[in-house]
Amino acid sequence: MVSGERRHAGALREEAAAALAPLGLRLAEEKTRVVHIDEGFDFLAFTIRRMRKRGTQKQYVYTVPSRKAIQAIKDKVSAKTYRSTRHQSPETLIQSINRALAGWANYFRHGVSKAVFSKIDSHAWGRIMRWIRHKYKQGRSGIGMPELRRRFCVPGTWTFAVNGVRFTGASAVPVTRYRYRGSNIPTPWTPQPVSAPS
């Protein structure tokens, strides 16, 4: 990262490539590019980008799940709720989706992910609802919504729960943002306090 213009970043890239060459390493052209922080970039399935904080004029660098990562988990949930999976029991399906979403959310819980988790849960909820309606089809339109809610949801809510198995989704994983600890992490170069002579 540089505080300057694109040419400064390009020069630093060349320096990095020169430093790696004696080690037998090189920068992969398809994975290395110079971008402005306002444009953002994807790294390890996160999108890192500077944006204006809602309701203020201040700008911060945000780390959010990338579009590709979000689409990947949606596709996984969709695959688990295809027609070919209707031989399973509802509780088996819900357990499987809970595990997939919890694993995905645990990786992304250190970013700005709360709103994304809610969107993923909405997608999963809709897929489970359609899966149940088609599995227990009654007539052309499938099981009615009042009946679905009575049989497959926590009383008084739209939270799926069957035989003690409850849909928890990605939102059950708490988002815990990383705090800056750079000055607190000891390194070999951290100056040690000088003890007073006895």
Image: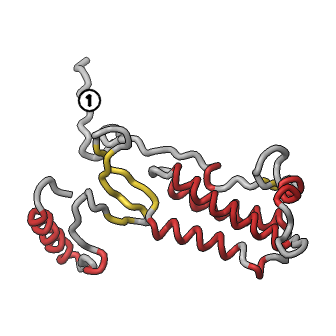
Colour scheme in use: secondary structure
Q: Is residue 169 left or right of residue 36?
A: right
> What is the crowding at mark 1: few (fewer than 14 residues within 10 Å), some, or many (at least 20)?
few
Query: What residue lies at 46% left-to-right and 70% top-to-bottom?
Result: 68
Q: Secondary structure at mark 1?
A: loop
| Position in image of residue 72 (x %, y %) | 54, 71
Q: Position of residue 5 (x, y in %)?
A: 11, 60
Pick the front one: 159 or 170: 159
Residue 67 horizontal side relative to residue 13, left or right: right
Q: Is residue 142 visible?
A: yes
Q: Residue at x 22, y 20 (%)?
A: 197
Residue 121 placement (x, y as % from top left): 63, 57
Q: Which residue is mark 1?
A: 193
Q: What residue occupies the far front of the structure in this picture?
A: 140
Q: Quadrant of residue 42?
A: bottom left
Q: Residue at x 37, y 65 (%)?
A: 43
Q: What residue is shown at x 81% (from left), y 67% (from top)?
A: 132
Q: Quadrant of the C terminus?
A: top left
Amino acid type at circle 1 is Pro
Q: Name the quadrant of the N terminus.
A: bottom left
Which residue reaches farthest top? 198
In the picture provided, is 169 more to the left or to the right than 20? right
Q: Position of residue 84 (x, y in %)?
A: 77, 82
